[in-house]
Image (tube, grey):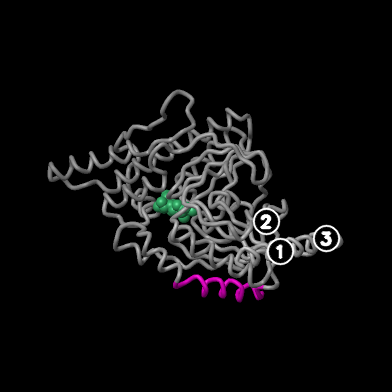
Amino acid sequence: MAMNNSNDYMTRATARYKADSQARQRDPSLPVDILAIESSCDETAAAVIRDGHIVLSSVVASQIESHQRFGGVVPEVASRAHVEQIIQVIAQALQKAGKELHDMQAIAVTFAPGLIGALFVGVTAAKSLALAADLPFLGIHHLAGHLYASAVSDRLDPPFVALIVSGGHTELLHVTGHGAMVRLGHTRDDAAGEAFDKVSRALGLGYPGGPAIEQAAKLGNPAAFAFARALLEEGSLDFSFSGLKSAVLLVLDKHKRAQKEVPVADIAASFQMAVVDVLVHKAMLALQRTGLSTLVIAGGVAANRALRDRLLDVCQVCGVRLVVPDLWLCTDNAAMIGAAAYYRYQQGKLSSLDLTAVATLSIDAW
Ligand code: KG4
Ligand code: ZN
């Protein structure tokens, strides 16, 4: 019975998609409005996106306060908070856009990667709504979402090199076409954002660590500590941040044992500089390697001013076009999922209701 429902749904959703595409061929001004949902980590978010770049609404219910007292994201707390918030967040996104569910051309949701319980909440909500309204449904890779955050305010014309730096991922990609990419490098241990979070916790600066370190670093000397930059083997485009984190912990420990006051601002500034140095070095190496002249940065760490400023300088000198997302689109939100979904929709890559949440999935396997 469930199988039949699911098959019937696919027939109806595909028919709807075809009718819609034909209508748009006759009248290209008809918009593609997508309701997008994101719940892969600690933000419950929904948005309505028109044509992949016009944000009709974007609602983000942050769980930061729920996790702050634990110093990081607690998966069970996140799942519960998503369940409590998701319906309201979706309703608000539709209401703010002045739309009803049946006005949408499709529903998109982050299905991978992320916290499995958290992902399930979004995926279940999206599938239920798609089934109820016979709407095409698209499962979106979270990192593709991050990548397409820039499509909201800028042109995103492959081919280009992408540097995605978030709390869970550090990836260098060669994006060859919309939704087509080859992974050039990735972190072998901690993600860049994870390093910010761990160092921040050690320095007593709290969660999330990125903005806290950035703030503290403003008053510090970035040359105070010469933390090693892990460049790995000659020419490698992989990253490693756990050694840097350990180096910071060692300095902290030394100060504590000597009962000396911890120079928090100097450590924060020196740590941030070390991360920025490595990210910029590898991104430029990837551009050289591929012969491309456009760099797109994405993910929570792309909100970091020191990283943005340095890349702006370097890219200007090297004649590289740098594409950066607006600040509010760097950290998790559903607008970016809707932007990525638009290109997927154009390609007719609809998902079936069999699609399920997946905790780990490389972006080039999507
Ligand atoms: O992309 P995101 O919202 O979630 C994941 O997909 O992981 O990224 C969150 C990460 C956190 O580790 C946070 O500390 C970091 O991005 N972050 C920053 C900044 N804002 C957020 N890192 C450095 N500087 C920032 N301004
Ligand atoms: Zn993210």
The answer to whether the residue bearing label 3 lies less than 8 angstroms from the nearest atom of ligand 2 is no
Query: Residue flagged by tag 3: what amino acid is it?
Result: Gln
First in sequence: mark 3 vs mark 1: 1
| Residue at mark 3 | 22
- The question of residue 345 being in magenta is answered with no
Tell me residue 360's x, y (percent).
47, 48
* Tags 3 and 1 touching, CB below 8 Å: no
**Highlighted magenta segment, given as a residue range:** 84-101
Left or right of 204 on screen, residue 52: right
Q: Is residue 26 found left or right of 80 in the rendered image?
A: right
Residue type, label 1: Ala
Q: Are marks 2 and 1 in contact (CB under 8 Å)?
A: yes
Q: Residues within 10 Å of mark 1 (few under 14, many from 20)?
A: many
| Residue beneath the point at 50% across and 41% down | 171
* Residue 362 in view in this figure: yes
Q: Residue 229 appears at what percent x and percent y?
A: 37, 32
Task: Kindly identify which numbered label has been placed on residue 350.
Answer: 2
Which residue lies at the image location 50% right of the left edge and 66% below the top edge?
60
Q: Which mark is residue 67?
A: none
Q: CA distance from mark 2 to mark 1?
A: 9 Å
Q: Find disc 1 in the rendering and name its residue.
A: 13
Say which quadrant the N terminus sits in.
Answer: bottom right
Which x, y percent locates residue 96?
A: 60, 74
**For marks 3 and 2 on the same chain, the one whose residue lies earlier in the sequence:** 3
Residue 304 at least partly seen: no
Q: Amino acid at mark 2?
A: Leu
Give residue 263's position: percent from left, percent from top: 24, 46
The secondary structure that dominates the magenta segment is helix
